[in-house]
Amino acid sequence: MKKLQQGFTLIELMIVVAIIGILAAIAVPAYQDYTIRSRVSEAASLSGATRTAVDVAFSEGYNLGSIPGTPASMNLSPAGSYKSKYVSSVSYDTTGVITVSLTSEKSLGDAKSDTVVYVPSDRGGNLSWIVSSSSTVPTKYRPKN
């Protein structure tokens, strides 16, 4: 009588372990980059109110360069109000440039204590927002335009 093979050989098991190891070596760094990028995305969400206020001021006739300089004149909360675990402040200037400062939270990795700078661009009467190259956040973590 023939005896049927039972179980896996040692080589088959070693191949499976090697494949899992290779996948983990690729997946773990990609996952870490993804989580840092998601934390930095808080900059985009917390700057939303300020971007909207600059958009409204622009549509009401203010030119880029003459945007009201105080948050109260733009119906915004004081600059220190816009903060979270990963964002320490959101500020803007009279040209409409918005600067979002990130905290020194360790889980931000290479992006900790960096800034994301949004620059408005007049597109025929409408503003378009671009993440400036003067942002200190590494390019791979920056929000998309």
Image (tube, rainbow, N blue to C red):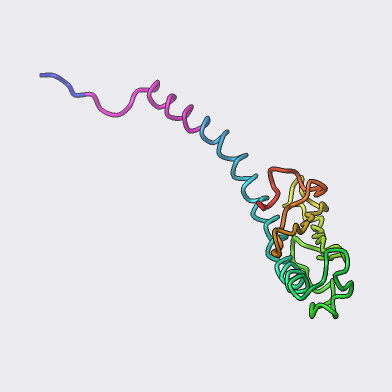
Image coordinates of residue 8 in percent, x first then y, are: 32, 27
**33 up-or-down from 64: above or below:** above
**121 up-or-down from 60: above or below:** above
Dominant SS type (magenta): helix
Image coordinates of residue 34 in percent, x first then y, are: 62, 48
Along the line of sight, the residue nearer the viewer: 6 or 120? 120
Along the line of sight, the residue nearer the viewer: 19 or 110? 110
Image coordinates of residue 72 in percent, x first then y, are: 85, 80
Give me the residue at 43% from left, 24% from top: 15
**113 up-or-down from 60: above or below:** above
Magenta includes 6? yes
Give me the residue at 51% from left, 34% from top: 23
**60 up-or-down from 15: above or below:** below
Give me the residue at 79% from left, 77% from top: 76
Q: Would you identify the image quadrant in which residue 82 lies? A: bottom right
- Quarter of the figure that contains the N terminus: top left
Which residues are the magenta region?
5-20
Q: 124 left or right of 7?
A: right
Extreme residue in the left direction: 1
Q: 99 left or right of 26?
A: right
Q: 125 left or right of 80?
A: left
Extreme residue in the front direction: 124
Give me the residue at 39% from left, 22% from top: 10
Image coordinates of residue 139 in percent, x first then y, are: 72, 43
Magenta includes 49? no
